[in-house]
Image (tube, rainbow, N blue to C red):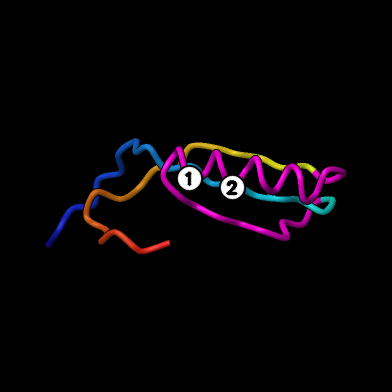
Amino acid sequence: MTESFETSAPHRRVRVWFGAHPIADHTAIADQAAQYEEAMRRRFASLRVTSEPVLVSATAPERSR
């Protein structure tokens, strides 16, 4: 039996919203997420763009993004 602990990591989840519906969803390390957020704000100036911290499982393998 393995335990899965969630730890705070330097990852952020950036989403672009069309009303209540996310039309883009991207998770990356903080500096890459900031670049993505900036690009999405320029590309979709009239839409809401959010960026929030992500808890990453300590036992989950790192995915390429």
Residue range highlighted in magenta:
20-47
Q: Is residue 58 left or right of residue 38?
A: left
Q: Is residue 54 magenta?
A: no
From the viewer's side, name the closer residue of 58 and 27. Answer: 27
Q: Pointers 2 and 1 in contact (CB under 8 A)?
A: yes
- The picture places residue 19, in percent across and down from the top left corner, at 84, 50
**Amino acid type assigned to the residue bearing label 2 in the image:** Tyr
Q: Residue at x 87, y 44 (%)?
A: 46
**Amino acid type assigned to the residue bearing label 1 in the image:** Gln
Which quarter of the rendering shows the N terminus? bottom left
Other residues around mark 2 within 10 Å, as few (<14) / some (14–19) / many (≥20):
some
Q: Residue at x 24, y 49 (%)?
A: 58
Q: Is residue 45 left or right of residue 11?
A: right
From the viewer's side, name the closer residue of 30 and 5. Answer: 30
- The picture places residue 7, in percent across and down from the top left corner, at 30, 39
Other residues around mark 1 within 10 Å, as few (<14) / some (14–19) / many (≥20):
few
Give residue 32's mark: 1
Q: Is residue 32 magenta?
A: yes
Q: Residue at x 59, y 39 (%)?
A: 51
- The picture places residue 39, in percent across and down from the top left corner, at 67, 46
Query: Mark 2 — residue?
Result: 36
For mark 1, give the secondary structure.
helix
18 shown above or below 33 = below
For mark 2, give the secondary structure.
helix
Q: Residue at x 25, y 61 (%)?
A: 61
